[in-house]
């Protein structure tokens, strides 16, 4: 046997002997997660509920994604072409897109999905109002023909706020628009395992082997760039009690908890086996007026109340004073630190308060001593605290208050009642605007000024509505920012609502897990160290 034959034979033998020890299946990676609440509605085009949108991020994908500066980048799309006048856009799908049922993703699926999405999403509706025709040119290309330029077209398709423009098979997207889709077939990194879903207890997602991440040169940012699934299974365990959830994390029975109450931050900070993550997009607490009924149909009284609100008082009542890095008392109309945020008129929102002047303004407004019905959701700590601070403040500035205590579910139903407070209506209520929905005017429900067609509270402001339309037509970022300054000043003038400050959600993970995105609970960048 010559030397060449000897080496080949020896190498083959060694490889055979080594095979059982070296070629083995990679260990299965599972991530056990406690979400902030139970998942009850699966269709992301049918609700703006945060939990449903978080679910959708695993199962579905969008044509475009957003980077850390909230600018659009191709995701399912390979790219696009547009005419010089901006009236025709052709988007081409990238290769190797497959739905979880094994069928290829086609332009026809994208067209049907976008039409369904646009029936409910605020920005989607605005896009379709500007669209003359949306068609599939072939299996790989879809075309928008516009009535007028819509510079925000790609941003609309990239949005991860309100209702994401999730792409699903045409057969599902063309179903009844007044009923949510219940069959979960997306093309995202994980598939929804329906047979393991137990409402109120467990949600399971399995890594989808047919998903092919983008091959972008830049690292993943928010929803842009390669979505690489490092987890074979993502398991949501529903644990309503926050203390029990934290105990499970400390015992390493789970790997992460979405929402950590401020009471537990100190304990978790001291535990080296746990990492805390401050979300970059806070939830804004707001005071909302009923604009249809006295006395807050009177803008002079709304302005007087605005002059009394001290965001520091509200944020301290809601969050305590121990960890001030997790809240801000400098909240305007748009999220602090994002492109549309502005300092315009901030002195009116957060400047020094003079309650003697406020009392004089209340009298000058023509307030007639009407009883103000204030909804107090006692089982929702944040808004219960806001209600108590407001009741005390109103009394100090000369307003007569009737605090009506109820559970959160009842308050949510009650706030939709347009009748007189004496007949089941209301005057003042509280809620939170999640950060992703306060990035710009498109999904900002509290900004709408279209009267009875507006979000509950039903403010009417032709100027706010016009500024919103102007923003959609703005040719560039600088023009958008300028319009948002005007919007903030108009909010101070009309007072459709009052921002009370913003709280940053804190999530917690086992320290062996790295690279979670800060904007939302996204799982496709995270991995074990």
Image (tube, rainbow, N blue to C red):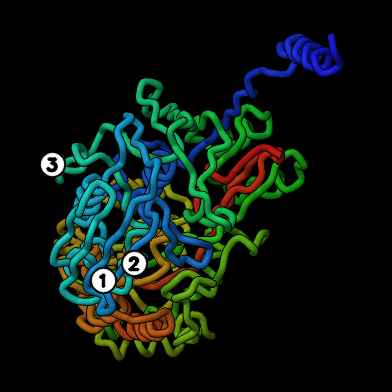
The residue under the point 34% across, 71% down is 441
Q: Quadrant of residue 251?
A: top right
Q: Residue at x 31, y 34 (%)?
A: 185
Q: Residue at x 57, y 55 (%)?
A: 518
Q: Nearer the viewer, residue 58 or 229?
A: 229
Can I make out residue 491 in this image? yes
Q: Which residue is mark 1?
A: 448
For marks 3 and 2 on the same chain, the one whose residue lies earlier in the sequence: 3
Q: Residues within 10 Å of mark 2 (few under 14, many from 20)?
A: many
Q: Are marks 2 and 1 in contact (CB under 8 Å)?
A: yes
Closer to the camera in the image, 8 or 412: 8
Against 164, is 86 above or below? Answer: below
Could you tell which of marks 1 and 3 lies nearer the N-terminus? 3
Which percent across, then down, holds residue 459?
23, 73
Q: Note whether 235 is above or below 37 in the view shown.
A: above
Q: Which residue is mark 3?
A: 176
Quadrant that contains the C terminus: top right
Q: Helix, strand or loop at disc 2? A: loop
Would residue 40 be seen by someone viewing this image from the given angle? no
Which element type, helix, strand or loop, lies under badge 1? loop
The residue carrying pointer 1 sits among few (fewer than 14), some (14 to 19) or many (20 or more) residues within 10 Å by Cα, namely many
- The residue singled out by tag 2 in the image is 444
**Residue 314 place in picture, x, y as percent:** 51, 66
Q: Alpha-carbon distance for marks 3 and 2?
A: 27 Å
């Amino acid at each position: 046997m010559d030397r060449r034959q000897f080496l080949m034979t020896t190498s083959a033998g060694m490889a055979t002997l080594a095979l059982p020890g070296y070629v083995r299946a990679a260990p299965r990676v599972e991530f056990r997660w406690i979400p902030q609440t139970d998942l009850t509605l699966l269709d992301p085009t049918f609700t703006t509920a945060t939990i449903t949108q978080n679910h959708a991020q695993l199962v579905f994908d969008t044509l475009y994604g957003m980077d850390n500066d909230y600018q659009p980048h191709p995701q399912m799309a390979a790219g696009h072409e547009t005419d010089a006048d901006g009236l025709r856009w052709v988007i081409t799908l990238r290769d190797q897109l497959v739905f979880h049922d094994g069928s290829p993703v086609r332009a026809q699926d994208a067209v049907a999905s976008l039409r369904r999405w646009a029936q409910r999403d605020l920005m989607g509706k605005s896009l379709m109002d500007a669209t003359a025709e949306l068609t599939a040119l072939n299996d790989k290309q879809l075309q928008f023909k516009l009535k007028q330029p819509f510079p925000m077209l790609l941003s609309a398709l990239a949005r991860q706020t309100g209702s994401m423009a999730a792409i699903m098979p045409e057969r599902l997207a063309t179903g009844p628009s007044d009923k949510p889709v219940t069959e979960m077939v997306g093309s995202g990194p994980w598939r929804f395992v329906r047979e393991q879903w137990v409402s109120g207890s467990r949600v399971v997602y399995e890594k989808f082997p047919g998903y092919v991440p983008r091959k972008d040169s830049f690292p993943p940012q928010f929803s842009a760039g390669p979505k690489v699934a490092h987890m074979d299974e993502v398991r949501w365990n529903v644990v309503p009690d926050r203390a029990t959830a934290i105990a499970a994390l400390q015992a390493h029975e789970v790997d992460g908890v979405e929402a950590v109450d401020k009471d537990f931050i100190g304990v978790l900070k001291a535990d080296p086996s746990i990492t805390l993550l401050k979300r970059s997009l806070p939830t804004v607490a707001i005071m909302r007026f009923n604009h249809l009924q006295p006395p807050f149909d009177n803008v002079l009284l709304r302005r007087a109340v605005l002059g009394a609100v001290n965001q520091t008082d509200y944020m301290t009542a809601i969050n305590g004073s121990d960890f001030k890095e997790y809240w801000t008392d400098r909240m305007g109309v748009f999220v602090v630190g994002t492109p549309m945020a502005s300092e315009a008129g901030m002195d009116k929102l957060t400047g020094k308060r003079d309650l003697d002047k406020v009392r004089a303004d209340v009298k000058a407004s023509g307030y007639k001593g009407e009883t103000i019905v204030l909804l107090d959701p006692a089982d929702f700590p944040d808004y219960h605290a806001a209600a108590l601070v407001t009741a005390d403040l109103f009394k100090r500035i000369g307003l007569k208050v009737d605090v009506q205590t109820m559970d959160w579910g009842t308050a949510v139903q009650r706030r939709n009642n347009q009748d007189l407070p004496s007949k089941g209506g209301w005057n003042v209520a509280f809620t939170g605007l999640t950060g992703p929905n306060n990035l710009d005017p498109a999904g900002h429900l509290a900004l709408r000024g279209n009267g009875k067609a507006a979000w509950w509270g039903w403010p009417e402001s032709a100027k706010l509505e016009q500024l919103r339309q102007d923003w959609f037509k703005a040719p560039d970022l600088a023009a958008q920012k300028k319009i948002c300054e005007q919007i903030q000043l108009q909010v101070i003038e009309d007072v459709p609502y009052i921002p009370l400050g913003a709280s940053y959600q804190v999530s917690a993970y086992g320290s062996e897990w790295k690279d979670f995105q800060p904007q939302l609970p996204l799982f496709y960048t995270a991995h074990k160290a």
